[in-house]
Amino acid sequence: MESDGETSTIYPLAIPKGATKKACELCQRPARLQCTQCRVTFYCDKEHQLEDWVGIHARICELLVPIRSPGPVLCLKADRDVYHAQILFRQTELLDISRAVVRKKLFEGKPQEALPAAQLSLRCTVDLYGATAVLMVPAYLLLAETNMGLGDLRQARQFLCQAEWTVITSPDCGHLIRHQLHRGLGRLHAAAGDLEAALHHFANDVYYASEEFGLDSTVTCGAYFLMADVFVKQGDLRTAQSLYSEVAGTWNSYLTKLCEARVGNGQCPSAAEPSFDEVRLAEVDRMLRTILEELVQKISPITDCAQTAVVQHCRAMLWFLAGDAEKVLEFSRKALQYSLMVPERGLTGPIQDLLQLVQRDPGPDPGPDQTQ
Ligand SMILES: [Zn+2]
Ligand SMILES: [Zn+2]
């Protein structure tokens, strides 16, 4: 990033008579400053400009110019249709970028920096679909998650209430959105310490996710992972352990299919699973590490070798897909070490195959989104 964004003062006389007053991008108060690069974004003060620049504006400054500038005067309907299609395409792109930025910032533990992008994703959704559309729900959920990250549970609850209301008033709302809503509500209750309510919402999350993706999907087992954490908090380690095993097993078969598809021995699994970008990879790796820590350190005083082998094998396959041969070797060796300690050696073969594959050819092409 070469700068922190240049601004200039808005001169009231330069704004045409009758034009609406400019509002700050972040707080909607009257603006005094303007981004000098795009000239279509305004701020109340330097602090909000900097916050927005770091949060998202540096990424999208140029993209905003065609979206926010007044359109050309076009006489032919065909030309107007082309122009509107182009704007729609750019707005969709803007929404995708803002959502991706929120996820990345939240994963990096920077909720404050995620806030401008989360606010923008809400505004983009309104522009694209209207304020009452059921597609507002993901935008409210992102804002709720960001506020949970900031520790502002009251604000998070408000956004979740809006999401809930949108679902209640949309009878045609599908399973996907309902699953997302219950996951958000479950997370809020878990954060607030209301563990029974959290479990109730995660159970609904499982129901709707399995209707949409299937019971053996990695999306559905995301709810099991969250439930396991609640059971750990409740001191029910046995239930937590069985849920963690379920999660590890689901990921193991999903990653096995992806790896087989990669080396040309199989079909890619369901295209309905979320795409495997850089952030998702890091999220999954973090989840697997949590399972290892919970299984090994808290739940089983004597290391559970079979489970550890399954999770380490998952990590090896994950990094195989990401093209990091060193990590594949590291985790495959660990997985092998544990799998040899259990009487049932079902995993040993696949782990040895992966090890041999990487030792023979250490460089599968890495790519940002190559696994779908
Ligand atoms: Zn402001
Ligand atoms: Zn700008």
Image: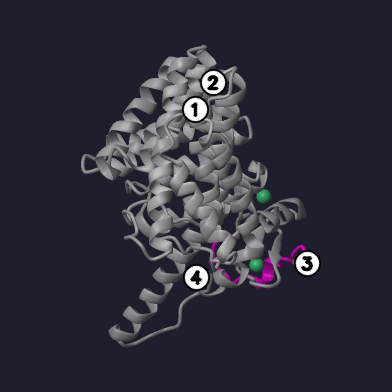
Q: Where is residue 137, by image quadrant? A: top left
Q: Amino acid at mark 2?
A: Ala
Q: Are marks 2 and 1 in contact (CB under 8 Å)?
A: yes
Q: Which numbered disc flags the more N-terminal residue, 3 or 2?
A: 3
Q: Which residue is mark 3?
A: 3
Secondary structure, mark 3, is: loop
Query: Of circles 3 and 2, which is in front?
Result: 2
**Nearer to the camera, 91 or 221:** 221
Residue that numbered label 1 is attached to: 188
Real-space Cα separation, disc 4 to disc 3, in angstroms: 23 Å
In the foreground, 25 or 259: 259
Q: Which residues are magenta?
A: 4-21
**Please, what secondary structure does the residue beneath circle 1 have?**
helix
| Residue 83, position as x, y percentages in the image | 39, 79
Residue 124 in the figure: left or right of residue 214:
right
Which circle marks residue 192 in the picture? 2
Whether tag 3 and tag 2 are in contact, CB under 8 A, the answer is no
Q: Amino acid at mark 1?
A: Leu
* Residue 76, position as x, y percentages in the image: 31, 87
